[in-house]
Image (cartoon, grey):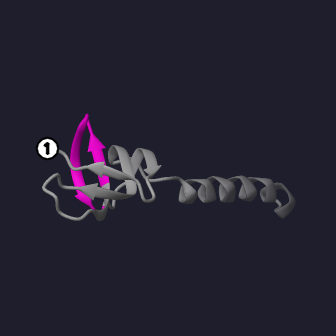
């Protein structure tokens, strides 16, 4: 195989490798709400936190490392913590 014939093949291989390297990691949660203000329902001050939801339940409140199928940036939005009234 000559260099002229191999160049398109090498370009195709390089493109496939680059695309897979840039692919997003699989979602860990259904929804991740980032940068919100979480209220605990007990009159304490709000705290900045992320909230992860999976199968309709809050599964993590705090700094969420994983990705969500849906990501929401709640910059400065307040929402109550699970279980508060």
Say which residue appears at 87% left-offset and 59% top-offset: 4
Q: Secondary structure at mark 1?
A: loop
Say which residue appears at 45% left-offset and 48% top-offset: 72
Image vertical order of residue 56 relative to residue 16, above or below: above
**Residue 51 appears at what percent x and percent y?**
30, 52
Is 52 left, or right, of 18 in this rendering?
A: left
**Residue 82 appears at what percent x and percent y?**
19, 45
Is 62 left, or right, of 14 in this rendering?
A: left
Is 53 left, or right, of 19 in this rendering?
A: left
**Residue 62 appears at what percent x and percent y?**
26, 62
- Asked if residue 66 can be seen in this view, the reply is yes
Residue that label 1 marks: 83
Q: Residues within 10 Å of mark 1 (few under 14, many from 20)?
A: few
**Residue 53 appears at what percent x and percent y?**
28, 43
In the rendered picture of this protein, how many numbered marks are placed on residues?
1
Name the residue furthest right: 4
Say which residue appears at 14% left-offset and 44% top-offset: 83
Is 52 left, or right, of 8 in this rendering?
A: left
Determine the main secondary structure of the stretch shown in magenta.
strand
The quarter of the image holding the C terminus is top left
- Asked if residue 1 can be seen in this view, the reply is no
Q: Start and end of the magenta stretch?
A: 51-63
Say which residue appears at 79% left-offset and 54% top-offset: 8
Foreground residue among 67 and 36: 36
Q: Is 55 within the magenta?
A: yes
């Amino acid at each position: 195989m000559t260099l002229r014939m191999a160049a398109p093949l090498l370009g195709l291989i390089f493109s496939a490798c680059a695309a897979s390297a840039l692919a997003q990691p699989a979602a860990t949660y259904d929804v991740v709400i980032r940068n919100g203000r979480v209220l605990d329902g007990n009159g304490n001050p709000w705290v900045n936190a992320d909230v992860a939801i999976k199968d309709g339940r809050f599964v993590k409140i705090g700094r969420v490392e994983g990705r969500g199928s849906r990501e929401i940036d709640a910059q400065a939005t307040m929402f109550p913590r699970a279980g508060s009234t």
